[in-house]
Image (tube, grey):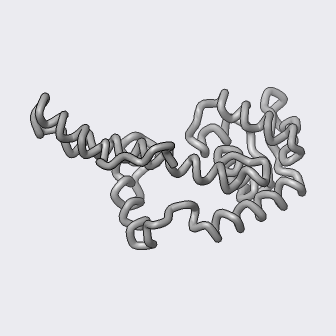
Amino acid sequence: MPETTLNFDPIAEARRQWDLHWGPQAGPQVVAVTSIMRAQQILMARLNALLAPLDLTFPRYETLMVLFYSRQGELPLGKLSQRLQVHRASVTNVIDKLESAGLVARVAHSRDRRATLARITDRGRAVAEQATDVLNKAGFALEPLDRATCEALFSSLEPLRRGAGDFAAQA
């Protein structure tokens, strides 16, 4: 939460200023982008606060869960990067932190000597389950949004993600 609560909506004011200086054509897009970016900041702060007692951040939690759900509990770092949709360097950093906490181990790939796998440990599985329980109980920090609003947000943003190449359209 900000140190001082404003007595006006800064995004609405930005829209007013935008319309005044540039015209209203892009106003809806300006406030949509700004609102999405602010929502991301709010959610990341809330989620990280919920996970802090488990010595996790949300990116570390997401990585644990991708490994948790994988068939063998392990994936090459490049595949983790793809699934998490982040740069390989970010995955390496997260895996370093998870490994130092004993939640993940790096292991050699059995068929490709060039590849390194990240494998979730038993402790990592236990922490992933505990973190998921915390996040589920907190509604993933989305209060005051209800289920229908969350579904609508997902549906509204899906074409943007698909158009960016995040995944292929389903036939």
Where residue 128 appears, as percent x and y from the top left, is 76, 58
Question: Which residue is at 80% across, 27% downward?
Answer: 114
Q: Quadrant of residue 27?
A: top left
Is residue 46 shown above or below 27?
A: below
Is residue 107 shown above or below 149?
A: above
Q: Is residue 97 left or right of residue 10?
A: right
Q: Camera-side residue: 45 or 135? A: 45
Q: Quadrant of residue 16?
A: top left
Question: Which residue is at 66% across, 51% downward?
Answer: 49
Where residue 22 appears, as percent x and y from the top left, is 13, 29
Q: Is residue 92 left or right of residue 142?
A: right
Question: Which residue is at 18% across, 34% downward?
Answer: 18
Where residue 108 appears, as percent x and y from the top left, is 87, 35
Q: Camera-side residue: 56 or 77? A: 56
Q: Camera-side residue: 5 or 101? A: 5
Q: Is residue 119 left or right of residue 3?
A: right
Count of marks, rendered view? 0
Question: Which residue is at 75% across, 57% downward?
Answer: 68
* Quadrant of the rendering where the C terminus is positioned: bottom left
Where residue 15 appears, as percent x and y from the top left, is 21, 41
